[in-house]
């Protein structure tokens, strides 16, 4: 496989890294996370103006026409700065749902708004009882008056408080854990009966609990096929896992590089810490684990680009390794920084917390190891 970036991807990578370097030092990020929305509207508009929000939108709708590899380039750079803007929720999860599932009228109306940043989306799929199982859905949509009435509750909706619309998984037939009978709907967060309770998460991001009480949607709000939305939901989740893995790889790079730099500066017994062989070995282990994870990310991304859902097994392997390696690198970075590694003033802990949250999203390492083995 060819792991070299194309000329367009290299230009994209350079522009995102400049944005992160110019705007995302730790103090700036901490200040932004305390906003009501948890991010900068100015930065969001900058992303729109630079064309990042339309990276996977087809060219016919004014987008870049890219794929998961282009998203990977963006998300890896975002991971190096712990970027707070809801790119993942809207431009990755939400946009995939619209591009792959919406009818032509909805695409024509909504995709330009997504590219311009005037509309934000999020995916509402997780429920209190579902843990990591996409098919475990009890939120129900009942046919009524040429449309549907949705009742239920969704948990941990990424940036749900700042989303204009939600992509909601609901059961239109079958039992609680049946793969068949799941449908996806586009729901306006300002619609009657929608209640959104936003809250900050441990990694400085935002999430929300969303309840639906007799929320009416139309036939045109259905994404994909009735009762056969699980495949589309799985495709969205695969794109989400690849994007999160890329973000994690970016965060891991910062952790091991910061650790190497710190051990070269910090002296003990008249020697820098980096002179001690046991610590050298530890940092080599961190670097090797990072490189293995990055290589698997590239391979998994390219296989999904070529084979779609058929590459699910390597996606399971990637998510398992991201959780395992992220924890290993994070724990060692904190330990080698000593007491400083536990402080809020040092960015080490913030990157480690983000890696732990990434591990829990769309299934943790144990879940994906089970799926891989099964």
Image (cartoon, rainbow, N blue to C red):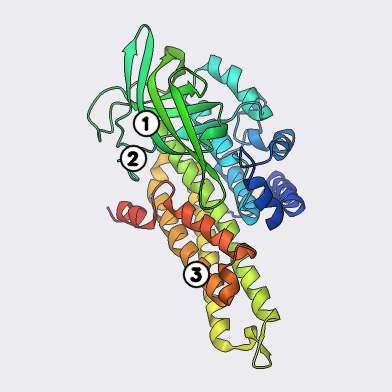
Percent coordinates x, y for residue 29 in the rendering: 67, 51
Which disc, if any, is residue 128? 2
Tell me how many marks there are: 3
The image quadrant of residue 257 is: bottom right
**Label 1 to label 3, Cα distance in Å?**
35 Å
Look at the numbered discs 2 and 1 and tell me whether their residues touch, using CB distance below 8 Å.
yes
In the depicted structure, whether residue 303 falls above or below residue 295 = above
Pointer 1 or 3: first along the chain: 1
- State the residue at coordinates (59%, 35%): 56
Which of pointers 2 and 1 lies earlier in the amino acid sequence? Answer: 2
Indicate whether 60 appears above or below 233: above
Instruction: Identify the residue shown where x is 56% and y is 41%.
Output: 88
User: In this view of the protein, can residue 302 be seen by the observer?
Assistant: no
Left or right, 175 with respect to 22, comes to left
Image coordinates of residue 3 in percent, x first then y, are 59, 55
| Within-10-Å neighbours for mark 3: few <14, some 14–19, many 20+ | some
Label 1 sits on residue: 153
The residue pinned by badge 3 equals 331
Assign a secondary structure to mark 3. helix
Residue 308 is left or right of residue 109, and the answer is left
Nearest to viewer (mark 3 / mark 2): 2
Residue at 38 percent of width and 21 percent of height: 213
In front of the other: 141 or 197: 197
Gap between marks 3 and 2, in whole Å?
Answer: 29 Å
Q: Nearer the viewer, residue 238 or 143?
A: 143
């Amino acid at each position: 496989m060819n792991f070299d970036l194309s000329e367009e991807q290299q230009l994209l990578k350079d522009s995102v890294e400049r944005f992160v370097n110019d705007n995302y030092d730790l103090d700036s990020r901490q200040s932004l996370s305390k906003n009501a929305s948890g991010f900068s509207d100015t930065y969001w508009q900058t992303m729109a103006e630079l064309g990042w929000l339309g990276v996977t939108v087809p060219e016919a709708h004014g987008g870049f026409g890219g794929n998961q590899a282009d998203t990977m380039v963006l998300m890896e750079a975002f991971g190096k700065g712990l970027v707070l803007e809801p790119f993942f929720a809207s431009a990755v999860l939400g946009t995939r749902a619209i591009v792959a599932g919406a009818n032509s009228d909805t695409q024509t109306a909504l995709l330009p708004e997504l590219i311009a940043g005037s509309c934000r989306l999020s995916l509402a799929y997780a429920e209190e009882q579902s843990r990591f199982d996409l098919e475990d859905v009890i939120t129900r949509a009942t046919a009524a008056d040429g449309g549907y009435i949705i009742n239920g509750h969704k948990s941990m909706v990424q940036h749900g408080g700042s989303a204009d619309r939600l992509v909601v998984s609901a059961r239109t037939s079958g039992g609680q854990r049946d793969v068949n009978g799941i449908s996806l709907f586009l729901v306006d967060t300002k619609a009657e009966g929608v209640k959104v309770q936003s809250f900050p998460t441990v990694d400085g991001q935002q999430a929300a609990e969303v309840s639906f009480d007799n929320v009416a949607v139309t036939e045109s709000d259905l994404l994909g096929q009735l009762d056969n939305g699980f495949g589309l939901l799985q495709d969205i989740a695969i794109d989400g896992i690849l994007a999160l893995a890329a973000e994690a790889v970016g965060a891991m790079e910062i952790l091991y590089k910061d650790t190497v730099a710190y051990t070269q500066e910090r002296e003990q017994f008249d020697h820098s810490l980096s002179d001690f062989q046991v610590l050298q070995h530890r940092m080599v282990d961190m670097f090797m684990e990072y490189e293995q994870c990055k290589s698997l990310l590239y391979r998994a991304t390219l296989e999904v680009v070529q084979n779609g859902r058929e590459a699910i097994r390597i996606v399971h392997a990637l998510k398992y390794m991201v959780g395992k390696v992220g924890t290993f690198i994070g724990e060692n970075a904190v330990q080698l920084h000593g007491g400083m590694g536990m402080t809020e003033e040092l960015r080490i802990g913030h990157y480690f917390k983000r890696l732990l949250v990434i591990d829990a999203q769309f299934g943790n390492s144990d879940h994906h190891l089970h799926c891989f083995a099964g």
